[in-house]
Image (cartoon, helix red, strand yellow):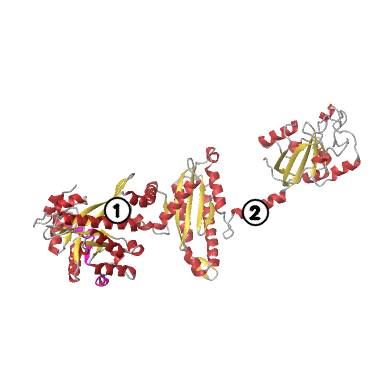
Amino acid sequence: MNGTSEGPAPAADLGPAVTESDDGLAPRTGRTGRTGRTGPPAYRSVFTHAPLAMAVVDAEGLVVSANDTLGTLLGTDPAALAGSVAADLVDLASDAGTWHAYREVLRGHRSRLRCTRRLKRADGHSLWAQVTVEPLAGTGDSGDSGDSGDGDAPGLLLSVADVSARRELQARLRHLQMHDPVTRLPNRALFFERLTAALEAESYEHGGTGRIGVCYLDLDGFKAVNDTHGHRVGDRLLAAVAERLTRCAEEAAHARSGAPLVARLGGDEFALLVEDSTGTDQLAELAAAVLAALQPPFELADRRLSVTASVGVVERHTAGTTPTALMQAADTTLYWAKADGRARWTLFDPERNANRMTRQALAATLRPAIERGEFALEYQPLVGMEDGRVRGVEALIRWNHPQFGVLAPNRFIALAEEDGSIVPLGRWILRTACHQARRWQLAHPDEPPIFVSVNVAVRQVWDSDLVADVAHTLEETGLAPELLQLELTESAVMGSAGRPLQVLKALSDMGVHIAIDDFGTGYSNLAYLSRLPVSVLKLDGAFVRGFQYDAVPDAAASGAGGANPADEVIVEAMVQLAHRLGLTVTAECVETSAQATRLRRIGCDTGQGWLYSRPVAPDRISALLGHAEPGGPAGVQAGVGNP
């Protein structure tokens, strides 16, 4: 191979310093045979005993003379090298590039060639050598030193330096650079080097399956091991895990050609790279084998530790794949395995990944969307079960996204809570809803004013001054506090202490109603309920849907359709409990008249659902106000309809 690494300098300056000799070391003054004439013995001695291995090569590429050091280096008599083809001695013809460069130097079209070659000695041992070929100074010069016959004089000096020790040191340094000191496995740098090479077109165009796979794993709860037992024990555990992963790879190699590369990518993250994979089944089997191998406890000195792992599995065609894209997919899949419960492997799912990419796109544009005014509110009526009148409305946010269309809150509220944009978004919802409720009140002075219910996230309680925000909004809009209801989920309210509880009490003291949303699906800490400043329970729709058995008798008899007669008993008990505590009850997801009838008989105060109206724009709520029919929901349904 070609090379330009530095080594011992060749003895090019010996050419002009010597005279004619039988060894052909110097330019000649006339045409002579290949063996030349004898020169001063002193110069011959310098060449012969020089510590650098050298040979003089004639214009035809044949060795004219070699010194003792070259003979020793190659394990042969230097005299026996005379007449040998120089290129064969130092393996210059093994690749086309080096051979072409050598011929250029030989013809005088290039000043020097330097390369590194693996040479074989006469005794069979090999060595790494740095080979330098360059013209002898003065060779072929028709100046004062000779006539044109000098062109037949020896033209090249070949020098060879043994760099085996340096190569060995470089190899050792590279090994240290490319391997993890704790586990002795290949590290991230070597892993990506191998991965990049495997994805190059040349590596799969000539043979192989043209596929590649990665098992990317992370130890579950490893931080607790470090925190509890110290980093020394943690390092031992990592080394033990590495041994088991290596055995898994070796066992996989027995069944198929080639063992997967096992690498530690950092921390408690490992990866197994499978080149020329045969499909997802192969990677799934490997991931399952890895999890099984990690199940037995680890015996570390006087400690017995157990550890599990989550594994992300990716397998695909190499064509069109980049290292970055492959590892991003593996990292995403590993995250899914963690989110799905840990101690498992998960296969990359393009559809799930597309949803993730959409989530990321939404998260990146949430805050700017607030500033651009891309959000709007729709309102769903809360209807009195006894008289069918609209008692209030729940404000439900919609995102008019320029790319994805109208998005319901379940597509982006969780993202807003994660990145904190729920705070400014919540302020906008509160202000907009209160303004709208006040406008309805002013537009219908002869009707009892309706309240507006606004959902509040827990992060709004912690990250903002919710009490001040509410007080400012009520003052700004002129809406009475009793016409504002704030909804929090059961899991957020139950068990509240410290700041959240103080906030709820302050809002309640202000006159604002506090409602527990989706009641019956969370902690259901009934004993704690009496101590909270709550005025409304909103029963989760799952209970109401169980009332459908009455409308479909056959389904009730067969147990089909998700009907559950026990739901009515549970709802009745919760309504009675709420009333004993002085709370009102709203039933969600009321979809049929039969459900409404049963809820009214049980004593439920208000209902909400598609039976009455879907979420609608503010102007359609105005059409409801003043509509009330003693029969119940029919009047509301007639007033708004089902869009």
Instruction: Tell me residue 541's x, y (percent).
Output: 22, 58
Q: Amino acid at mark 1?
A: Pro
Which residue is the extreme one toward the left?
630
Query: Would you name the residue on which mark 2 appears?
Result: 173
Give the mark toward the camera: 2 or 1.
Answer: 1
Q: Is residue 637 above or below residue 80?
A: below
Q: Please check the rendered image and state whether residue 549 is part of the magenta-colored stretch, yes or no.
A: no
Query: Would you name the residue on which mark 1 appears?
Result: 409
* Residue stretch in magenta: 528-548
- Lateral position of residue 114 relative to residue 56, left or right: left
Q: Amino acid at mark 2?
A: Leu
Instruction: Tell me residue 556's x, y (percent).
Output: 17, 57
Secondary structure beneath dot 1 equals helix
Q: Earlier in the sequence, mark 2 or mark 1?
A: 2
Q: Is residue 307 above or below residue 325?
A: below
Q: Is residue 24 above or below residue 416?
A: above
Which image quadrant: the N terminus?
top right
Instruction: Tell me residue 12's x, y (percent).
Output: 79, 40
- Lateral position of residue 283 relative to residue 586, left or right: right
Is residue 563 visible to the viewer in this orientation of the structure?
no
Q: Residue at x 72, y 51 (%)?
A: 165
Q: Residues within 10 Å of mark 2 (few under 14, many from 20)?
A: few
Which residue is the extreme one toward the top?
148
Report how far apart the C-alphas of labels 2 and 1 lie in the structure: 56 Å
Is residue 79 visible to the viewer in this orientation of the structure?
yes
Secondary structure beneath dot 2 equals helix
Q: Is residue 129 above or below residue 604?
A: above
Corner quadrant of residue 497:
bottom left
Instruction: Tell me residue 49's x, y (percent).
Output: 85, 45
Number of dots carrying numbers: 2
- Lateral position of residue 289 relative to residue 190, left or right: left
